[in-house]
Image (cartoon, rainbow, N blue to C red):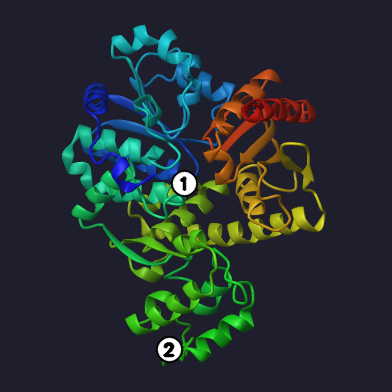
């Protein structure tokens, strides 16, 4: 979609809904914030918590891996005046029975709620702020932290200084991967962060680790892959040598991309870009990156992608609280986060090797899938599925489903290539309907979705998924 087709202003209906929800938040004395454990959820919850702190409200911040029946019951019975759910909740609106509820989410909403719960909405006791309700995509136009920030700003315009957290949340949710830049409502929020002096935008190489990875590793593990360079440490070192770009500084310390001067960056950029044949790969390689000006480049927080990875590693390893402390400016939590990040990298690498070495990937007519059992944590199996989809082991034109053991059944994570989404595939609907048909729950986005299903229903679930996919593409 061309840039001109994206909105540059928020719609009046949303602004009115934000004002009404803001009055509800300001009128509550006690608030429970319930949020997700990934980077988007942690930043969303942190924005909500700081907003409430500034209002002088009594609040509690609670992290949830997903909305379960038990989580629904806890929310319905919570004694606080208001429960504010961030980056979660929209798919389960029909199950919430309490008054005093605000949801700032970007996942596909429960379609039944809009008609079945309109009377509650009319009385102003339940407010759902979700881009899908305004015909805006929650997959790439705005994230959960973005919706939470928009409400925070409606509560008090001075909260514009929290916009940078919404940018981190959007990057953590890969919302820049479609256009290789933030667009639409994300762009509006980005401009707030730039105006506040917290974010700087630059067009450059988009590889991960601009401030933290030594140059050789920066090139070795970069995506998209460059033939003859990616994955080959010696080739990367030789490339730097041929371009007369030192890998070490005068003190012997390893240099990073941020250490390079303009000439060195231009040389390396030209070499990488000229080595790519596909225009789409060139767009993915060179595009916008977002520097968080509050932090030093090598701190692990100076780049939005690195910041979000730090938060993700906290949440995936049962330490979302450390991520929230970092978002609140508590740098003592960085040491914990660094250990989480090391564990994250190690476990992802081991999980990928486990799937590939044991040849777990299987194919049906319409999907490819693998069963991880207890060998891969349910909190990272979706990441592994997405990474597998980009390898030569996987079919590039089929969605991938990954199954892992969970406390309340079997966790299913689904990912799909962009080509199928453009052709009309909606994983959120398929996962939701297929899970419901086997006694489970599901939802998410068109390109990435998840479900929890009863143990023993995996094959029946796959049957249902295939039926729905075949219906989508039937003439």
Q: Quadrant of residue 347?
A: bottom right
Q: Position of residue 430 (x, y in %)?
A: 61, 28
Residue 265 badge: none
Residue beneath disc 1: 173
Q: In terms of depth relative to the viewer, which is nearer, 190 or 278?
A: 278
**Would residue 86 appear left or right of 364 to someone viewing this image?**
left
Of the numbered discs 2 and 1, the one sitting upstream in the chain is: 1
Q: x and y percent of residue 354 in the render?
A: 76, 55
**Figure check: 343 above or below 325:** below
Measure the C-alpha gap from mark 2 to mark 1.
34 Å
Residue 334, percent from left and from top: 44, 60
CB contact under 8 Å: marks 2 and 1? no
Residue 151 position (above or below residue 204): above
Can you tell which of label 2 and label 1 is closer to the viewer? Answer: 1
Considering only vertical position in the picture, is 294 above or below 216?
A: above
Residue under circle 2? 249
Relative depth, front residue between 263 and 295: 263
Give the total number of marks visible in the rendering. 2
Asked whether residue 318 is in view, the answer is: no
At mark 1, the secondary structure is loop
Counting from the top left corner in percent of width and height, residue 444 is at: 53, 33
Quadrant in the picture for the N terminus: top left
């Amino acid at each position: 979609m061309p840039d001109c087709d994206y909105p540059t202003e928020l719609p009046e209906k949303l602004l009115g809904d934000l004002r009404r929800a803001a009055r509800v938040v300001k009128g509550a004395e006690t608030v429970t914030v319930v949020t997700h454990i990934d980077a988007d959820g942690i930043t969303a919850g942190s924005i909500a918590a700081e907003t409430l702190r500034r209002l002088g409200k009594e609040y509690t911040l609670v992290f949830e891996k997903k909305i379960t029946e038990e989580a629904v019951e806890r929310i319905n019975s919570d004694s606080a005046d208001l429960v504010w759910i961030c980056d979660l909740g929209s798919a389960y609106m029909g199950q919430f029975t309490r008054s005093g509820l605000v949801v700032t989410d970007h996942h596909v909403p429960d379609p039944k709620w809009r008609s079945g719960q309109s009377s509650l909405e009319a009385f102003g006791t339940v407010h759902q702020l979700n881009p899908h309700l305004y015909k805006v995509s929650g997959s790439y136009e705005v994230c959960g932290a973005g919706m939470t920030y928009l409400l925070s700003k409606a509560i008090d315009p001075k909260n514009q200084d929290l916009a940078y957290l919404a940018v981190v949340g959007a990057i953590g949710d890969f919302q820049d991967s479609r256009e290789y830049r933030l667009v639409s409502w994300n762009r509006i929020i980005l401009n707030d962060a730039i105006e506040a002096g917290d974010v700087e935008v630059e067009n450059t190489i988009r590889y991960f680790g601009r401030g933290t990875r030594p140059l050789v590793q920066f090139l070795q593990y970069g995506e998209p892959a460059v033939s003859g360079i990616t994955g080959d440490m010696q080739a990367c070192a030789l490339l730097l040598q041929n371009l007369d770009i030192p890998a070490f500084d005068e003190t012997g310390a390893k240099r990073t991309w941020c250490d390079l001067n303009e000439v060195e960056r231009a040389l390396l950029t030209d070499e990488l870009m000229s080595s790519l044949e596909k225009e789409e790969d060139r767009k993915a390689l060179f595009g916008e990156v977002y520097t968080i000006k509050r932090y030093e480049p090598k701190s692990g927080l100076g780049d939005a992608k690195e910041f979000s990875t730090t938060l993700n590693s906290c949440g995936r390893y049962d330490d979302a609280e450390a991520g929230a402390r970092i978002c609140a400016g508590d740098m003592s939590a960085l040491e914990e986060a660094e250990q989480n990040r090391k564990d994250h990298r190690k476990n992802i690498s081991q999980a990928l090797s486990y799937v590939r070495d044991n040849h777990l990937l299987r194919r049906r007519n319409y999907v490819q899938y693998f069963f991880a059992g207890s060998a891969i944590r349910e909190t990272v199996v979706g990441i592994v599925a997405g990474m597998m989809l980009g390898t030569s082991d996987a079919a590039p034109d089929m969605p991938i489903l990954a199954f892992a053991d969970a406390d309340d059944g079997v966790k299913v994570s689904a990912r799909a290539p962009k080509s199928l989404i453009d052709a009309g595939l909606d994983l959120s609907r398929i996962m939701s309907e297929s899970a419901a048909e086997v006694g489970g729950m599901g939802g998410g986005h068109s390109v990435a979705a998840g479900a929890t299903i009863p143990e023993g229903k995996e094959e029946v679930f796959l049957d249902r998924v295939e039926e729905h996919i075949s219906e989508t593409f039937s003439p």
